[in-house]
Image: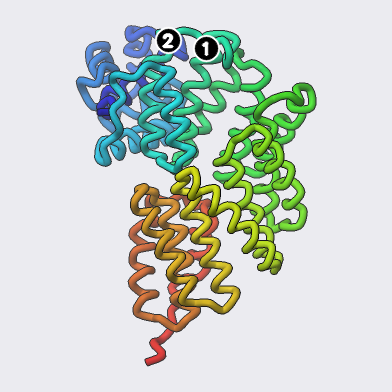
Amino acid sequence: MAVSCHVAFGHYLRTLRERRGLALEDVWTLSQTFPESLNKGYLSRCENGKQKLALPKVVAVSRIYEVPSDVLVERLELDLELEKIGGPPTEKLSWGQLRDAGTNALRHGHRWAAYAFFRDATLKVAKAELDKESYACVGEQIANSFTNCATAGRSLGKYRYALQEYRYAETSGSLGPDSTILINERLAATYFCVGDHVSAERHAKLALAHLEKHPESRFGAYLFEQQGFFLVRNRDYLEAIPWFQKAYDAFKKQGTVSECANVLIGLTDCYQESGNLGAATRTLDIAKRICDEHSLRRLKALTLALQGIVDEMSARPEAAEENLRDALSIAKELNDRILRFKVEFYLYKHALGNGKAAAARSIRRRLDKLLPSVPNTVEQVLYLKAMGNNQVSDKN
């Protein structure tokens, strides 16, 4: 099984303390000004997973470690949820095996498994042998291990936790050219997710500037893809298309099939939003074939959801509902609440648009139940709030 929730969270607490260069004695001394002080024995037990960190003490920890309290809460929520779901076996795997397993799980849409692998890799990275092909020094390897964990957390909607880890890596002084490009790309994407578009644009420009100096970087394709998705979010669909095409060519050259499929999904979105349903269908067919050939379950769900939207626009309501329900089944299988919310939202719109009031009410209840676990910056959340409690009456 994966490492227990309290051991994993305790290790993260120790990591935050050590980053500040503090001994347990220092923390106890600094905590004397807070209503909830932190004695050495208590904090040691928390770090070793033998005691839970009480919520009243989170304020003291966050202030002393200079980490926002919502970062600690998000990280603890991830560990508690993973404990509830049940993670994959990790105890017998080396750091390198855990890293590779996490990468593979993330590519195939198994986000909770990816989090488990990447998180438990951080417990072993300090003692791992340096991967000289990927990292220039031990510091860079450690920083990348923690940012991998943060990336999995970000994919599960924990943006504040991800930002904390990315910002730490950025200022660690351990990053080589490739890692610098990657961390700025991730910062840009995450700032965009929390609605800070100014910071997102700044880091995107920094990443592109570093890429100009190191054009051979394997992460260039991610920047092209990112520019495409930024433009999509801004409704600049025609401008996004060349960026997606450039990203697709780069990923195809690298042989990164999961990203090829993801880019094609972005292209499909551009085509269907621009009214070019023929191009959308052709692009989607290629993406679906890639997903089927390589078992890319989450991306397959996205292609099915997009197919449902295209079917709806093409006046094929039965096909639209079938594809959306197939997408929903995959989202449930993956325990992906964000994906499930997105698909349920499209099913809600489908029900409203086709006069199915009873179905719409049922779906709306599910959406409201999912809402607290979905970041409020997710596009479908914003749409749902704008719609209010819009309903239709039954045709019958």
Report which residue position mark 2 lands on: 128
Q: Nearer the viewer, residue 78 or 109?
A: 109
Q: Residue at x 25, y 40 (%)?
A: 84
Q: How is the image coloured?
A: rainbow
**Residue 190, placed above or below residue 12:** below
Q: Quadrant of residue 27?
A: top left
Q: Residue at x 49, y 64 (%)?
A: 385
Give the crowd class for mark 2: few <14, some 14-19, many >=20 residues within 10 Å.
some
Residue furthest right in the image = 212
Q: Nearer the viewer, residue 183 or 256?
A: 256
Q: Residue at x 37, y 38 (%)?
A: 112
On residue 383, the disc is none
Q: Secondary structure at mark 2?
A: loop
Instruction: Say above or below: 21 vs 75.
Output: above
Farthest residue in the bottom direction? 396
Location of residue 186 with respect to 284 vertically, above or below: above
Question: Residue at label 1?
Answer: 131
Q: Which picture quadrant has residue 152?
A: top left
Instruction: Specify the amino acid type for callout 2.
Output: Ala
Per the image, label 1 sits on a secondary structure element best described as: loop
**Spot occupied by residue 133 in the image (x, y as percentages of width and height):** 58, 13
Q: Position of residue 29 (x, y in %)?
A: 35, 11
